Image: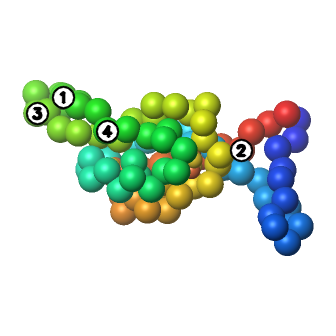
Amino acid sequence: MTNITYRTYGGHPWIPQYVEAIDLDKCLGCGRCVKICSRGCLTLVSYVDEDDTERFIASIAAKDKCIGCQACGKTCVRNSYTFQPLEI
Ligand code: SF4
Ligand code: SF4
């Protein structure tokens, strides 16, 4: 198994890191990641905590559209995201 590798404009190898998961315990529901994703992969959804408190959290709505840019993770102040390369 090898990771899918593309090239930058300058010809350097680039391995996309695709969105894998969001840590719900860390997410504040600020929506920064949703706004920054140019592919429309992310959304905010209502979530009810164990103590019955309703809040918003980020959710992966369309993982199939992800290009592995990691912009969502870079903008998240809570470091909620994890990523994975795609193996072929
Ligand atoms: S940027 Fe981070 S804290 Fe804000 S909604 Fe996205 S995952 Fe949650
Ligand atoms: S890695 Fe890039 S394309 Fe994928 S969900 Fe995050 S911002 Fe969107």
Q: Earlier in the sequence, mark 2 or mark 1?
A: 1
| Label pair 3/1, CB-CB below 8 angstroms | yes
* 3D distance between C-alphas at marks 4 and 1: 13 Å
Pointer 1 residue Cβ closer than 8 Å to ligand 1: no
Residue 84 rendering spot, x and y as whole percentages = 65, 43
* 3D distance between C-alphas at marks 3 and 4: 16 Å
Q: Earlier in the sequence, mark 3 or mark 4?
A: 4
For the point 52% across and 31% down, the residue is: 62
Residue 81 rendering spot, x and y as whole percentages = 48, 49
Reply above or below: 25 against 37.
above
Residue kind at label 4, given as amino acid type: Leu
Pointer 3 residue Cβ closer than 8 Å to ligand 1: no
Q: Is residue 75 left or right of residue 15?
A: left
In this rendered view, identify the residue nearer to me: 59 or 52: 59
| Label pair 3/4, CB-CB below 8 angstroms | no
Residue kind at label 2, given as amino acid type: Pro
**Element type at mark 2:** loop
Reply above or below: 84 against 6.
above
Residue 20 rendering spot, x and y as whole percentages = 56, 38
Q: Quadrant of residue 78?
A: bottom left
| Label pair 4/2, CB-CB below 8 angstroms | no
**Residue 85 tag number:** 2
* 3D distance between C-alphas at marks 3 and 2: 35 Å
Q: Quadrant of residue 61?
A: top left
Q: Is residue 61 left or right of residue 47?
A: right
Q: Which residue is mark 3?
A: 53
Q: Earlier in the sequence, mark 3 or mark 2?
A: 3
Q: Which residue is mark 1?
A: 48
**Element type at mark 1:** strand
Q: Which residue is mark 4?
A: 44
